[in-house]
């Protein structure tokens, strides 16, 4: 009996050992991947921000420690004609559009779809369709519609209306791309909001109906407080992209001619354009500066959202 018990314990230990080996083999892969492609890359980016390459007297190229990248950054940010300042201002425009326009509109549309208004299924398909189609395809379609000799120009030309070339003009290119972002970007938050609304207890909604509250009062006094964790999460995530908010500038500029290069620059595209041209030290300094600036803002917004309305469980 003692031998059988010992053999049974050994079998159990061997099974547990195999399970642990199987589990940790998969976890080890994820940890190695995280260390190489996140920790190592970010450490290298931080170090690049404080480096510059220079040529020695004997012709060798070496890297030296310097704060010159940050000095150049602040100088460019202060110049009115610099692409950095243009990209910074355009990035703030996209952030304001996403946070203060698209979030309220997405919440309102989600609520009306939740209330099952007339033809709500058709509206749902129309609103979610841009998120299903590839961004490359949709940008190409959008350009074909509004570019010179496109569909809208042809239709308006038949009634004698001369439509301006929106993407070619640097003054109208960014607002046009912002309209595209608004048109195609509503579905993301709507999926989250509708998922949260569909989980609301029917008893609470029915009680409000019996009390005779209006749809507006129901949205602000019942629905929004109950989906507050989801709503606050989208707001916090929006503020994490404060300095990386950007439209599909790469798709518009790289999908052929017909888009004004000047006036459409954003921080993300500017950093990308610098790095693909072999400039790494200056973009690294830019990334560190905007990361340091965004961290207290994000944590402050998170604290504020938690104080406005505590998390609700139901």
Image (tube, rainbow, N blue to C red):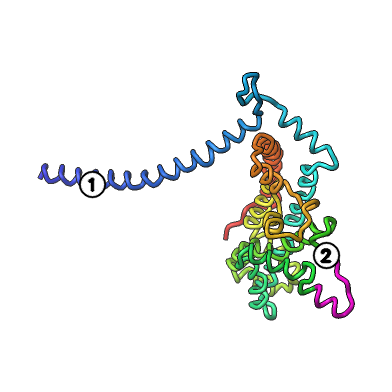
Image quadrant for the N terminus? top left
Please say if 282 is above or below 251: above
Mark nearer the N terminus (1 vs 2)? 1
Question: Residue visible at 70% across and 48% down?
Answer: 269
Q: Looking at the picture, tell me which residue is in the foreground, 3 or 235.
A: 235
Give the quarter of the image for residue 115. bottom right
Q: Is residue 187 magenta?
A: no
Q: Residue at x 77, y 67 (%)?
A: 147
Residue lying at 88% horizontally and 72% vertically, measured from the top left: 162
Q: Position of residue 89 (x, y in %)?
A: 80, 47
Q: Residue furthest top?
A: 57
Residue 222 visible in rendering: no
* Location of mark 1 (residue): 12
- The x, y position of residue 272, in whole percent, is 66, 46
Determine the CA span between mark 1 and mark 2.
Answer: 74 Å
Which of the pair 29/210 is nearer the observer?
29
Residue 18, placed above or below residue 249: above
Nearer the camera: disc 1 or disc 2: 2
- Determine whether 188 is above or below 233 in the image: below
Which SS class for mark 2?
A: loop
Can residue 36 be seen from the camera position used here? yes
The numbered dot on residue 161 is none
The quadrant of the rendering that contains the C terminus is: bottom right
Percent x, y of residue 93: 78, 52
Q: Which residues are magenta?
A: 153-165
At label 1, counting other C-alpha atoms closer than 10 Å, the crowd grade (few under 14, some 14-19, many 20 or more) is few
Q: Is residue 310 left or right of residue 263?
A: left
Task: Name the mark on residue 165.
Answer: 2
* Nearest to the observer: residue 105 or residue 245: 245
């Amino acid at each position: 009996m003692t031998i059988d018990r010992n053999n049974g314990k050994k079998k159990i230990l061997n099974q547990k050992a195999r399970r642990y080996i199987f589990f940790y083999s998969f976890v080890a892969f994820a940890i190695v991947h995280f260390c190489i492609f996140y920790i190592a890359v970010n450490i290298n980016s931080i170090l690049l921000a404080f480096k510059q390459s220079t040529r020695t007297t004997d012709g060798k190229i070496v890297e030296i420690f310097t704060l010159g990248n940050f000095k150049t950054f602040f100088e460019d940010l202060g110049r009115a004609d610099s692409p950095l300042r243009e990209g910074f201002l355009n990035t703030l425009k996209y952030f304001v559009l996403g946070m203060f326009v698209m979030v309220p509109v997405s919440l309102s549309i989600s609520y009306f779809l939740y209330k099952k208004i007339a033809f709500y299924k058709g509206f749902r398909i129309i609103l979610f369709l841009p998120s299903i189609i590839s961004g490359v395809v949709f940008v190409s379609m959008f350009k074909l519609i509004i570019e010179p000799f496109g569909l809208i120009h042809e239709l308006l030309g038949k009634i004698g209306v001369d439509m301006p070339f929106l993407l070619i003009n640097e003054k109208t290119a960014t607002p046009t791309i912002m309209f595209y972002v608004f048109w195609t970007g509503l579905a993301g938050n709507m999926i989250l909001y509708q998922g949260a609304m569909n989980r609301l207890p029917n008893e609470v909604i029915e009680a409000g109906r019996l009390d005779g509250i209006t749809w507006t009062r129901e949205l602000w006094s019942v629905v929004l407080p109950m989906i507050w964790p989801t709503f606050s999460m989208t707001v916090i995530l929006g503020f994490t992209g404060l300095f990386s908010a950007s439209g599909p500038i790469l798709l518009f500029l790289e999908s052929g001619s017909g888009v004004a290069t000047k006036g459409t620059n954003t921080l993300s595209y500017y950093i990308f354009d610098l790095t693909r041209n072999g400039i790494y030290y200056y973009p690294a300094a830019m990334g560190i500066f905007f990361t340091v600036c965004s961290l207290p803002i994000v944590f402050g917004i998170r604290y504020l959202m938690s104080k406005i309305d505590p998390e609700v469980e139901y």
